[in-house]
Image: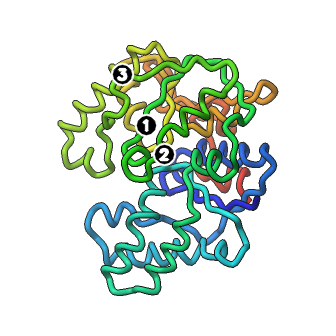
Amino acid sequence: MRIAIFPTCIADAMFPYAPVATVRLLERLGHEVVFPADQACCGQMHVNTGYYRMAMPVIRNYVRSFEPMLDGEWDAVVAPSASCVGSVRHQQAMVARQEGDEALARQAERVAERTYDLSELLVDVLGVEDVGATFPHRVTYHPTCHSLRMIKVGNRPLRLLRAVRGIDLVPLPEAESCCGFGGTFALKNAETSTAMVADKADHIVATGAEVVVSGDYSCLMNIGGRLSRDGADVRVAHLAEVLVATADEPWEPAVLPPRRGEAGCACDGPPGSGCAGAPASAAAAGGAR
């Protein structure tokens, strides 16, 4: 298949490990991945804050960037973020319609129909659960709110993780509870958010896991920050970072943020090297093209 990648704003700007791992994984499975150069944000931040009119140019650009898929240029769009996929599916057409642009709403719906979270693409479209990964670590999985409640990925990520060789996958207590991030929720309701992520971090530490895995780096940023503040020796990793690892080409998840007592790395190593100084752009990292 020929697959277009939407790396998302937060991953492209701050955490390129997930989209780069997504590209390398799909290429290892024999697919071609392309990066539409004109893409930007999906508009979720604007919509969630109530700025529908300001979201319209952003939504229009997203649809324009990915609509070549509808003419057969690509077979699907993949994003390493259930949250952004949820916005594409449930917000873009709604906002366009409310703002009086029915044509854009219909086109957004057509693009959204073939936009997938990574776990959906692998299991439902490509028909694969065993991607040939090897990850010899004790791992627990945090299902994000949007993956569970908005796009309903169900147990697809867990099915993919269970097929990974060498993994010790342990259940997370109260897994379906929110981590407290929620974008601007963490800013507007800081005390509540802090209490929620504290509970989530405690449950993660209780599993004895070395790595907590999720499908959204926004949630991992929140969780990883709390784990670091607590001095917990637990790393965070996107699902793609686990699935891309093989016995011949291991992938070391980046520490986010550096664990207590560690200095931030200032090297120019690639994503996956454990270096916090990895390239700040998914496209610049050389995976997507």
Label 2 sits on a secondary structure element that is loop
Label 1 sits on a secondary structure element that is loop
Residue designated by label 1: 143
Tag 1: amino acid: Pro
Structural distance between the alpha carbons of marks 2 and 3: 19 Å
**Mark before the other along the chain sequence, 1 or 3:** 1
Structural distance between the alpha carbons of marks 1 and 3: 12 Å
Q: Residue at x 32, y 42 (%)?
A: 181
Residue 168 vertical position relative to residue 57 in the rendered view, above or below: above
Residue designated by label 3: 173
Dot 3 crowding, Cα within 10 Å, few <14, some 14–19, many 20+: some
Q: Looking at the figure, which quarter contains the N terminus?
A: bottom right
Image spot of residue 282 (x, y percent): 63, 52
Q: Nearer the viewer, residue 62 or 140?
A: 140
For the residues labelled 1 and 3, say whether their Cβ atoms are less than 8 Å apart: no
Residue 153 circle label:
2
In the image, taking residue 174 as reference, residue 115 lies left or right, namely right
Q: Nearer the viewer, residue 84 or 254?
A: 84
Q: Residue at x 28, y 71 (%)?
A: 51
